[in-house]
Amino acid sequence: MTNLDALKAIQENVDILSNQLVDDYKYIPQYEHLLPSSKKAEEIMSLIRSVIFPGYSGDRTIRKHSLPFHIGVYLERIYSLLKEQIHCGLSFDPEISANISNKDQEASNLAVTFINAIPNLKRLLSKDVKAIIDGNPATQSYGEVIFCYPAITALLHHRVAHELLKQGVPILPRIISELAHSATGIDIHPAAQIGEYFSIDHGTGVVIGKTTIIGNHVRLYQGVTLGSKSLILENLSYQADAPRHPILEDNVTIYSSSSILGRVTIGHDSVIGGNVWITQDVAPYSRIIQQKAIEGSFIDGLGI
């Protein structure tokens, strides 16, 4: 094949791939404006980590007398990047974009609102660090938890993403949550509501669904799924935001590889053992264990 033949083949495929009217490609949206950036989202999270855990991230030479200066620099950069990425997010969804007359002003307002929420995020994450060290004798110090534990990375990203989602910021919360998912193997939907003093031990494989509600002083181990039952796509009555994930009341512990599915409530002060499958409410102060294998069959996810 000659270079001319190769160029001809390339041009033919350019024409095909550039044609937005081809039926097989119509579901892929085409954007003419600037899209949010995962790299910028990573930078935002790095800066937020430096503000919440100063000295552990960012400039390691920070001392008490220079802390205000460094935090001021970080917050200014967070505002600038966040405003830019929120603006991109507001343009991402055509329906949202159509209802906002001044995206730049809206992005600025939302970025400032988030800056104002950072002190409370620091308070929540400080309690999460304490929850991890209080419940894990393998930890040597608070610093070790902040530096090394994937749960802190996942919770930092989740609490930031959840705050942005509450403010109505589109797409960016999901990008932030997926950054943590890729890095830690912990998958928390940004809409999930998580209380104070929350900890995840080990963490790999934990899944927390969109409409999950978690109380205070809750501990999860690796492989726990707080999910929904299988859905039949043909069910037209299904609503995307309908509550379909579990509620965990205060002081609940769930051990490794257990699955809690559907809109069920795990009562306060309950302990769920490992490898347990739960699709019904559990009363407070319960102790649930899988004592023996139970055979069952499911057709298309029914009967779960």
Image (cartoon, rainbow, N blue to C red):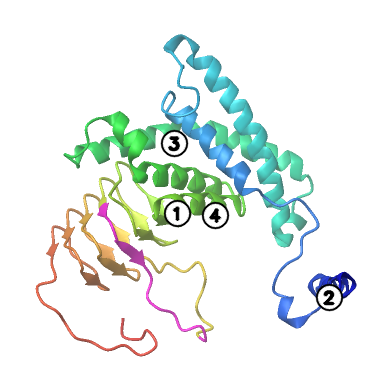
Magenta segment boundaries in residue numbering: 220-234
Other residues around mark 4 within 10 Å, as few (<14) / some (14–19) / many (≥20): many
Is label 2 or label 1 in front? 2
Amino acid type of the residue tagged 2 in the rendering: Ala
Where does label 1 land, which residue? 181
Amino acid type of the residue tagged 4 in the rendering: Arg
Where does label 3 land, which residue? 121
Residue 233 located within the stretch drawn in magenta: yes
* Percent x, y of residue 282: 20, 66
The answer to whether mark 2 and mark 3 are in CB contact below 8 A is no
Magenta span: predominant SS is loop
Other residues around mark 2 within 10 Å, as few (<14) / some (14–19) / many (≥20): few
Where does label 4 land, which residue? 174
Left or right placement of residue 283 versus residue 50 in this view: left
Element type where label 3 sits in the image:
helix
Element type where label 4 sits in the image:
helix
Where does label 2 land, which residue? 9
Q: Identify the residue at the far front of this view.
A: 2
